[in-house]
Image: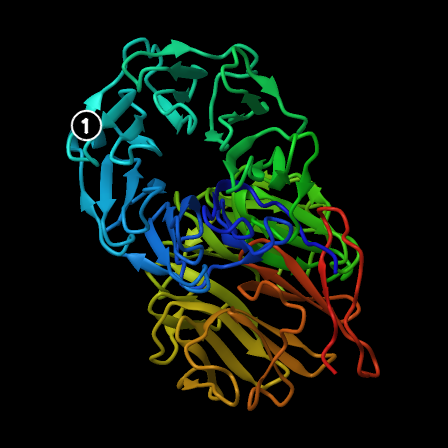
Amino acid sequence: MNTGPEAGVVNCIGPSPSDASVVYVGIANGGVYRSADGGATWSPANTGLAELNVLSLAVAPSDPQHVVAGTSAGGYRSINGGSTWSAITTLPGPTVVDVVFDPSSSQIAYAAGAEGALWKSTDGGATWSAIGANAAGKRPQTLAIDPSHTATIYVGTLDDGVYKSTDGGGMFTAQNSGLSNLHVSALVVDPTATSTVYAGTVNGGPFKSTDGGASWSVFAFGVSGTDTASLAADSAGTIYLANRSGTFHTAVGGLTWTALRFSATFVNAVAVGPGSPGRLFIGFGQLPFAVGGVFYSDGDRSSFVRGEGIHGVSIFSLAVDPFTPTDVLAIGGGGSTYLSKDSGLSWPPITSPESLPVSIAFDSDEQGVVYEGGARGVNKSTDGGETWNAADAGMPATVVRPVLPVPATTGVVLAGTSVGVYRTADGGLSWQATAGGPAGIVWSLAPGSGRVWAGADDGVYRSTDQGASWARSGSLTGPVRALLDSSVAGRIFAGTDAGLFSSGDGGATWTPVAGGLPGGLTIRALVDDPTRGAVFVGAFPGVYESVDGGSTWTAATDGLTNPYIQTLAVASGDALLAGAQAGSVFRMAAIAPIVERGAVDRAPSTETGTHEIPPRP
């Protein structure tokens, strides 16, 4: 099995304090991954996790299945090892940057909100209450607990240094004497001498206190760089520091830091599992400079092993070149763009526009012309995606989600924005708002025979004049995230957050689709495969296939280790490609005639490969 575009930018690591085999990591825009073998292999654990930018993780000290996650949109809790998550309504965020459990209790936990909040839970993270108003107002960034006196809490803030509470968060006092940089990003308490505390700053390097924070001194000799992303301690009292330059450690009583034999830069997280000294985990990555991942080391920390299976950049969009169908472009989170020249077998990265693209489409009438929609408008390439230029004059300042070069035209392109559909008739030189269409977010655009479709928050719209004007099509409510005017099935399909719907009367009426398709699926992608005579659905979770025009459906999930599918495409060789939310491209190749075939077993490839899925028998 080949790995796909592997770019797991690791924000945080949560080892279980009670079970050395269980570890969780939070990925930038990739959700949570869980390892049950100490970090050797990872699998996604995102069901119910509506916000995938995970910033912090805490595992209950006595229960490896009990986890709290802080995200860019509040807190989430799982009590079954990440199999399912539920939002914590009393931990709303908006940004929960750090979460810690009391090391002596699985019931007591603390959380920090970057916008100005501190919370405490006494029921295992189910409910939370605000604490420490004076410290919270200073934009807390990080938390640490004294393991020998767990009512002692340290809070690092962005605006005003370190605060300390000795009564479990009842009252906090500033502890900043000698702390010449007050932008504190990381804290750790030495477990072998708990009056010794280390503080890392955003731009002033690390500091050390030997009197419980009453006074601080610079402790930066041997560290490259002035930033600090993370601090951790093992049971022997060795302290680890992570920053953009790498990873460093200092032994008990040490006067200097020494770089670890770990060459990766942009290290965002460092953590130590249970045991003596405990497995060291290092998480790194920053796009577009470093694709990221997790390494771990035992013993003397002289060698590191990379965990397999993390794919942390969501694949938003796949597009096949109609003139050279072996060429496929993929758009990933963080602005990453990949170009496969072999129908999705390998995915070398290419230069991306600076607009954080989220969608991509080839023009079927002009060879080499590609359009990208993104956070800052539309970009255009005339060389198959190798180079890009802005093509959004007249476009409002809004995110462009779908883009659609209208077939059988020259230069007519549609763009779905947050304020409706925009249209250009000159290849992106100038754009105008269209008439009669949706006024809000447009999630999907699709061509048809003599017509064009748009899926919006309030339903489906239809145009018969190449997108210049629109009319509401039926009473289906949205958001409609995927549309397909299927030549295989002879009907139109609409994918919503409440499942799949179809229309056989040109969009006048819509009917829920069943026939083996689970109800309530969140549909994100639809594609025809004329060679197979099949229609495919990409959903949260899974891929489903119909070979009878949508009457009955079967799961097409063999080998699909990440079932959260956001985009589908069919490349040369009848290869079905599926882009997953947490950053992998899966490939199912057809065989003609179709015969039963065993699983494909391949050695791991480089970071730009693809998951190969055996074809359905």
Q: In this view, does 182 lie to the left or right of 303?
A: left
Picture layout, residue 268 above or below residue 458: above
Picture layout, residue 145 above or below residue 375: above
Q: How many labels does the image show?
A: 1
Report helix, strand or loop for mark 1.
loop
Quarter location, residue 200? top left
Residue 490 seen by the camera: yes
Residue drawn where x is 72% and y is 50% of the image: 347
Q: Which of 569 and 515 is in front in this view?
A: 515
Q: In this view, does 210 lie to the left or right of 123?
A: right
Residue drawn where x is 18% and y is 46% of the image: 129
Picture layout, residue 107 above or below residue 160: below
Residue drawn where x is 46% and y is 88% of the image: 505
How far across and how far down the image is residue 451, in percent?
52, 74
- Which residue position holds label 1? 172
Amino acid on which disc 1 is placed: Phe
Q: Which of 318 and 245 is in front in this view?
A: 245
How far across and how far down the image is residue 307, in percent?
64, 47
Q: Nearer the viewer, residue 572 or 233?
A: 233
